[in-house]
């Protein structure tokens, strides 16, 4: 006897009626984010280590804008913003310096090539015979690879935070980046 399609579907649905629940019975300190955070901090303090070597920077704000942790967060946020601005300034200065040096090297190489060509032809100076389209295609290939290596060398972090609404309010809804 074969089962009817509706009976098979009912059996399949019954099989998947187990619900996932993000709590481990009798393990509040492992399954609750706040409790886990506090316990990890206490553990690292007890072994004379910084919890931030293993945990992401976290600020637990209980009393809104008047909470001292909120003030710590603002100070940290501003410090990171200043670091990002300084890294951008350094990056721009370094890249400008490199581009000047590269332009000077190309100019010196071009001058040397012209000199060598002139010696071969028995003349002192001969203009370069490289077409403008060739030099443009070479420079565009070089600039693309330069941009890729610059991105790798000067990684600038973003000042991005996960903000979780107040105690017992979100239940997994409303988390924003």
Image (spheres, rainbow, N blue to C red):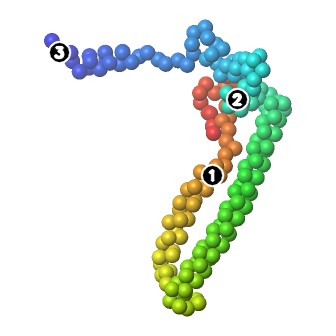
Question: How far across and how far down the image is residue 122, in percent?
Answer: 53, 91
Q: What whole-number distance in Å separates the C-alpha atoms at marks 1 and 3?
A: 65 Å
| Label 3: element kind | loop
| Label 1: element kind | helix
Whichever of labels 1 and 3 marks the residue nearer the N terminus, that label is 3
Question: How far across and how far down the image is residue 123, in percent?
Answer: 55, 91
Give residue 149's quadrant in the image: bottom right
> Quick check: can you spot residue 61?
yes
Task: Provide the residue designation for mark 3.
Answer: 2
Whichever of labels 2 and 1 marks the residue nearer the N terminus, that label is 2
> Quick check: can you spot residue 128?
no
Q: Which mark is residue 153?
A: 1
Q: What whole-number distance in Å separates the C-alpha atoms at marks 2 and 1?
A: 24 Å
- Nearest to the observer: residue 52 or residue 30: 52
| Label 2: element kind | helix
Task: Provide the residue designation for mark 2.
Answer: 53
In the picture provided, is 5 more to the left or to the right than 88?
Answer: left
Which residue ends up furthest to the top in the rendered image? 26
Q: Residue at x 55, y 86 (%)?
A: 119
- For the residues labelled 2 and 1, say whether their Cβ atoms are less than 8 Å apart: no
Question: How far across and how far down the image is residue 55, in percent?
Answer: 68, 28
Whichever of labels 2 and 3 marks the residue nearer the N terminus, that label is 3
Give residue 46's quadrant in the image: top right
Q: Residue at x 59, y 90 (%)?
A: 124
């Amino acid at each position: 006897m074969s089962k009817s399609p509706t009976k098979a579907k009912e059996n399949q649905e019954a099989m998947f009626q187990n619900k996932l629940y993000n709590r481990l019975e009798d393990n509040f300190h492992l399954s609750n984010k706040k409790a886990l955070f506090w316990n990890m901090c206490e553990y690292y303090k007890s072994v004379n280590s910084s919890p931030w070597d293993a945990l992401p920077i976290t600020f637990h704000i209980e009393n809104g804008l008047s909470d001292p942790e909120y003030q710590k967060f603002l100070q940290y946020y501003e410090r990171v913003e200043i670091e990002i601005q300084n890294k951008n300034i350094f990056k721009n200065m370094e890249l400008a310096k490199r581009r000047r040096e590269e332009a000077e090297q190309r100019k010196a190489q071009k001058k040397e090539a012209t000199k060598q060509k002139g010696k071969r032809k028995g003349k002192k100076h001969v203009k370069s015979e490289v077409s403008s389209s060739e030099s443009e295609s070479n420079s565009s290939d070089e600039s693309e690879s330069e941009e890729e290596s610059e991105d790798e060398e000067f990684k600038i972090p973003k000042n991005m935070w996960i903000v979780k609404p107040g105690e017992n309010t979100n239940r997994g809804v409303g988390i924003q980046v």
